[in-house]
Image (cartoon, rainbow, N blue to C red):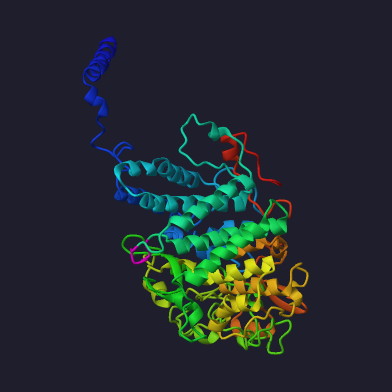
C-alpha cells in the first residue's frame, strides 16, 4: 500500500513539474469531449445547444409546457389530450389515469415525491440547461457571430424559461427564480421561494425578449421546425391572459389590466400581421375537426402554428389506440354547453330537442358537437367498433366492444385508419399551438378590459362561428340561467363558453377554471347520457351494462363515479386553486414554505 501511494504521489508530482515547465500546456483543452472553452464559437454551436433544449422540452410530464403526446407507451397517459380529465369536461376511469381523477375530485394530497406535471427534478434540470446557455451564448460574439444571431438563440431559451416559470407560478404561486448556472455551493439552493410578483416580472421580460428577437420564420419549412416569433406571441398572450385574470378574480398581485393589455396586444399582432388563418373550406360540418384528423404531417396547414411530428420507427405514440377508452368520454355538463343553431343556449332556445335519445341531443346544435362527440349515425362509418357492424353505438361499461363511461364518446381527434392499423407505432401528430387560440385570447382580454366592441368580436369569436356555420355573437347576448351566478357579464359568459367548445381536449379547461376562480364547478358530479328505461332498451337490450345513475330534475343520468373513491367531489377554495409542493423538495431546502392551505 505504501509503495502504491508513493508511486501515485510521484506521478502527480511529475505531472505538476511538467505543467510548470510548459506554459502552453495550460492552454490545451480536452480533445475527446466538448468543453465551454472550445464550444460557443459559431452559430451552429448555438443551434446545436438549443436543439438539446428542444429535446428536453418534449418530455411532457417533466416539462409540461410545449405539451403534445408523450412518446411510445407513455403517450396513453401524458399529453395534451388528457389534461381536460382534471376537469368537468371528461370522466376517465382507467387506473392509469388515477392522477386526473384524484385532482378532479379534490382527493389529492401532499405528495412525498415528484408529481405529474408539477414539481419535477427533470423540470429544474431543464431550467439549469437553459441557464448554462444564457451564461455562455455571448462568447460567440467574441468569435464574430452577429449580436442579432446570438439574440435569436437567447430568445429561444428565454421563451422556454419564461413559459416554464409561468407554469410553476400558475400551480404553486411562488417559485425559485434562477437565471444563471448554479454550483453545489450556490446560496440560491437554500433560499426561500421568490414571490409571484418577482417571478412574473422576470417571466414577462423573458417573453418580451423572445417576441422581439425570434425570427418570423427560421427558414426551416415549419415542419415543425423551431418556434418562431408568432408562436412566441401566442405563448405570451396565453400567459398574460392567465396572469391578468388570475390577479383580477383572485385579488392578488397588481396591474391586472397591464397583463390583460399585454395579452390583447400580443394576440392582435398575430391577427393583424401574422401568416396564419383559420382552416376553412366552407364545409361547416367538417372543417372544425379536419385539422385534428390529418395524419402524420401538418406542414402548410394555415391554422397550425406549432406541432409535434412522430415517426413510427423513431419517435412513435399510440394515442389513437387508447384514446377511445381511456378518456372515459365527455360529460353531460360539457355536451349541454353547445348552443343551438339559433345561437341560444339550450336553456333559452326553442330548437332544443332534449336528450331522450342521442339523436335528439345532436338535433339543431352547433355543428362542432357532432365533430367532437360521436353521433350514432357516424359510428359504423368511422369503424368505431373495429368494423364490427353487429355492435351498436353507444356502448357503456360492461358491454363488449368499444365502450365509454359516459356514453358520449369523443371523436374530435379520432382517426380510424391509424387507430386500428398500429399499436404503439402511431404517427398521429399533435397540434400544440393554433391560430384559433389567438382569436379567443384577444376577445377575452379585451372583454375583461371593457374595450371589446362588435368589430372586435367579428374579427375574433365570430370568425370561429363563421367556420362552424353558427350565428354571430352580439355584444349583449342573453344571460344563460346556468351561469347567472358566476358574477360576470353575459358577454364574458359566452366568450368563456366559446373557449370551452373550441378548445375542448386541447389542455385549457383546468387552467381556465382556476384563473376564473370557478373551482366550485368541479363539485358537480360527472354525469353521462340519460339512462331511463327507454334509453337503456336502445343501448343495452341484453342487460350487460354496469352503470349507476343519479336523478336530475326527475330524470336519471349515468353517474360515472358513484360508489367510487372519486364520488362526491370537493373543491376547497383555500387550497385547491394551487398544488402542494412535494415533501422531498422541502426536505432538501427547509426554507421552502409549503403552498398556502396545504
User: Disc count in the image?
Assistant: 0
Q: Nearer the viewer, residue 215 or 500?
A: 215
Segment colored magenta:
219-225
Q: Is residue 224 magenta?
A: yes
Residue 476, given in percent of the width and then of the height, sits at: 72, 79
The N terminus - image quarter: top left
155 to 469, vertically: above or below: above
Q: Is residue 379 above or below residue 114?
A: below
Res 446 quadrant in image: bottom right
Q: Where does the image place residue 178, in percent across and percent down from the top left?
A: 52, 41
Instruction: Say whether residue 520 is left or right of residue 259.
Output: right
Quadrant hosting residue 361: bottom right
Question: Does the magenta portion include 575?
Answer: no
Tell me if I can see residue 565 in this picture: no
Q: Left or right of 403: which side holds 348?
A: right
Which residue is drawn at the image coordinates 59% and 85% (left, top)? 470
User: Which residue does the image show at 51% across and 79% down from the upper left?
Assistant: 288
User: Measured from the top left, where is residue 33 in percent x and y?
Assistant: 27, 38
Q: Position of residue 393 (x, y in %)?
A: 54, 82
Left or right of 83 in this view: 11: left
Label the magenta part by its dominant secondary structure. loop
The quadrant in which residue 556 appears is bottom right
Q: Residue furthest top?
A: 2
Amino acid at each position: 500500500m505504501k509503495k502504491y501511494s508513493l508511486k501515485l504521489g510521484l506521478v502527480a508530482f511529475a505531472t505538476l513539474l511538467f505543467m510548470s515547465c510548459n506554459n502552453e500546456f495550460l492552454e490545451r483543452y480536452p480533445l475527446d469531449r466538448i468543453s465551454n472553452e472550445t464550444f460557443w464559437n459559431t452559430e451552429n454551436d448555438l443551434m446545436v445547444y438549443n436543439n438539446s433544449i428542444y429535446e428536453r422540452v418534449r418530455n411532457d410530464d417533466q416539462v409540461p409546457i410545449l405539451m403534445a403526446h408523450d412518446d411510445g407507451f407513455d403517450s396513453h397517459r401524458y399529453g395534451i389530450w388528457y389534461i381536460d380529465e382534471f376537469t368537468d369536461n371528461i370522466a376517465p376511469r382507467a387506473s392509469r389515469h388515477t392522477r386526473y381523477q384524484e385532482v378532479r375530485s379534490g382527493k389529492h394530497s401532499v405528495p412525498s415525491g415528484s408529481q405529474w406535471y408539477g414539481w419535477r427534478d427533470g423540470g429544474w434540470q431543464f431550467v439549469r440547461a437553459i441557464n448554462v446557455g444564457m451564461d455562455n451564448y455571448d462568447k460567440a460574439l467574441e468569435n464574430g457571430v452577429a449580436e442579432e444571431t446570438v439574440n435569436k438563440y437567447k430568445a429561444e431559451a428565454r421563451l422556454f424559461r419564461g413559459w416554464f416559470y409561468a407554469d410553476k407560478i400558475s400551480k404553486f404561486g411562488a417559485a425559485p427564480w434562477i437565471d444563471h448556472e448554479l454550483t453545489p455551493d450556490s446560496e440560491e439552493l437554500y433560499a426561500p421561494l421568490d414571490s409571484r410578483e418577482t417571478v412574473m416580472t422576470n417571466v414577462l421580460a423573458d417573453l418580451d425578449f423572445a417576441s422581439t428577437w425570434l425570427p418570423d420564420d427560421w427558414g426551416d419549412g415549419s415542419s415543425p421546425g423551431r418556434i418562431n416569433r408568432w408562436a412566441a406571441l401566442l405563448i405570451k398572450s396565453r400567459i398574460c391572459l392567465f396572469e391578468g385574470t388570475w390577479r383580477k378574480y383572485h385579488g392578488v398581485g397588481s396591474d391586472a389590466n397591464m397583463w390583460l393589455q399585454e395579452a390583447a396586444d400580443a394576440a392582435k399582432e398575430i391577427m393583424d400581421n401574422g401568416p396564419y388563418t383559420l382552416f376553412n373550406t366552407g364545409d361547416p360540418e367538417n372543417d372544425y375537426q379536419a385539422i385534428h384528423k390529418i395524419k402524420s404531417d401538418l406542414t402548410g396547414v394555415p391554422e397550425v402554428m406549432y406541432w409535434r411530428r412522430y415517426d413510427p420507427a423513431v419517435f412513435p405514440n399510440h394515442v389513437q389506440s387508447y384514446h377511445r377508452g381511456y378518456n372515459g368520454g365527455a360529460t353531460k355538463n360539457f355536451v349541454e354547453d353547445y348552443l343551438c343553431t339559433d345561437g341560444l343556449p339550450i336553456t333559452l332556445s326553442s330548437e332544443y330537442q332534449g336528450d331522450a335519445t342521442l339523436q335528439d341531443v345532436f338535433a339543431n346544435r352547433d355543428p362542432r358537437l357532432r365533430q367532437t362527440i360521436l353521433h350514432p349515425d357516424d359510428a359504423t362509418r368511422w369503424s368505431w367498433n373495429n368494423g364490427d357492424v353487429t355492435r351498436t353505438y353507444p356502448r357503456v361499461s360492461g358491454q363488449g366492444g368499444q365502450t365509454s363511461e359516459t356514453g358520449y364518446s369523443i371523436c374530435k381527434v379520432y382517426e380510424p385508419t391509424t387507430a386500428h392499423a398500429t399499436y404503439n407505432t402511431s404517427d398521429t401528430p399533435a397540434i400544440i399551438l393554433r391560430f384559433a387560440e389567438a382569436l379567443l385570447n384577444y376577445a377575452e382580454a379585451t372583454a375583461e378590459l371593457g374595450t371589446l366592441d362588435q368589430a372586435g368580436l367579428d374579427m375574433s369569436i365570430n370568425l370561429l362561428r363563421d367556420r362552424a356555420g353558427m350565428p354571430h355573437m352580439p355584444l349583449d347576448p342573453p344571460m344563460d340561467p346556468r351561469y347567472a351566478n358566476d358574477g360576470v357579464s353575459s358577454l364574458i359568459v359566452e366568450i368563456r363558453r366559446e373557449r370551452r367548445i373550441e378548445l375542448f381536449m386541447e389542455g385549457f379547461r383546468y387552467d381556465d377554471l382556476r384563473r376564473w376562480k370557478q373551482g366550485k364547478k368541479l363539485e358537480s358530479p360527472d354525469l353521462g347520457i340519460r339512462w331511463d328505461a327507454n334509453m337503456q332498451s336502445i343501448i343495452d337490450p341484453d342487460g350487460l351494462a354496469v352503470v349507476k345513475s343519479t336523478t336530475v330534475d326527475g330524470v336519471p343520468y349515468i353517474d360515472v363515479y358513484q360508489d367510487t373513491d372519486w364520488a362526491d367531489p370537493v373543491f376547497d377554495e383555500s387550497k385547491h386553486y394551487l398544488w402542494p409542493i412535494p415533501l422531498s423538495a422541502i426536505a432538501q431546502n427547509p426554507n421552502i414554505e409549503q403552498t398556502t392551505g396545504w
